[in-house]
Amino acid sequence: QVQLRESGPGLVKPSQTLFLTCTVSGDSIASVLRYWSWIRQPPGTGLEWVGTIGYNGNTYYNPSLRSRTSISRDTSKNQFTLQLNSVTPEDTAVYYCGRDCSPGRIVNTSVAADTTICKVWGQGTQVTVSS
């Protein structure tokens, strides 16, 4: 059974850098044609795709966040990490990691754990940006 688990700080100050790690069990992040993503849901709004790292290390980012976002991986630990720079209160959200996600399927009414969006979801972790 594939499981994803997010970890990271629950509270970050404005202008700081957010690091979130997704630990994968039951699958390898280097498995061919596997893609690993970060998706977030700010309070009172819908899901937003943040970015994806592929099995070969290629990365893809939401254009609106690209300048502040980096996704990396550690295959020895079977983890991938989101780095979000210069955070503001607008980055407050529940952050999810997922496997084999289709960002194009996200609509206003989308909810986390929808397996038509990501085949596997983590449980999510709350991140609050506040001084």
Image (cartoon, helix red, strand yellow):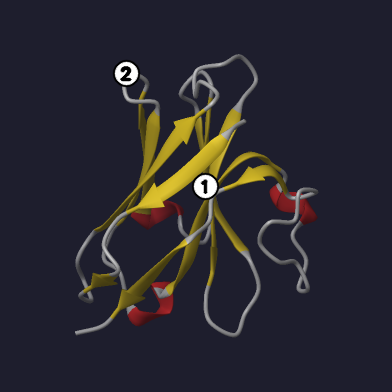
The residues tagged by marks 1 and 2 sit, at their Cα atoms, a distance apart of 21 Å
Against 22, residue 25 (above or below) is: above
Residue at image position (48%, 30%) is 25
Which quadrant of the figure has residue 73?
A: top left
Give the residue number, with chain letter if any, for mark 2.
76
* Mark 1 or mark 2: whose residue is earlier in sequence: 1
Circle 2 SS class: loop
Left or right, residue 12 beside residue 51: left
Circle 1 residues within 10 Å: few <14, some 14–19, many ≥20: many
Q: Is residue 73 left or right of residue 11?
A: right
Residue 7 at x, y = what percent? 34, 52
In front: 123, or 84? Answer: 123
- Identify the residue at the far front of this view: 1
Quadrant of the frame with the N terminus: top right
Three-letter amino acid code at the position of disc 2? Ser
Picture quadrant of residue 37? top right
Q: Nearer the viewer, residue 1 or 92?
A: 1
Residue 128 on image: x %, y %: 34, 76
Identify the residue under disc 1: 51
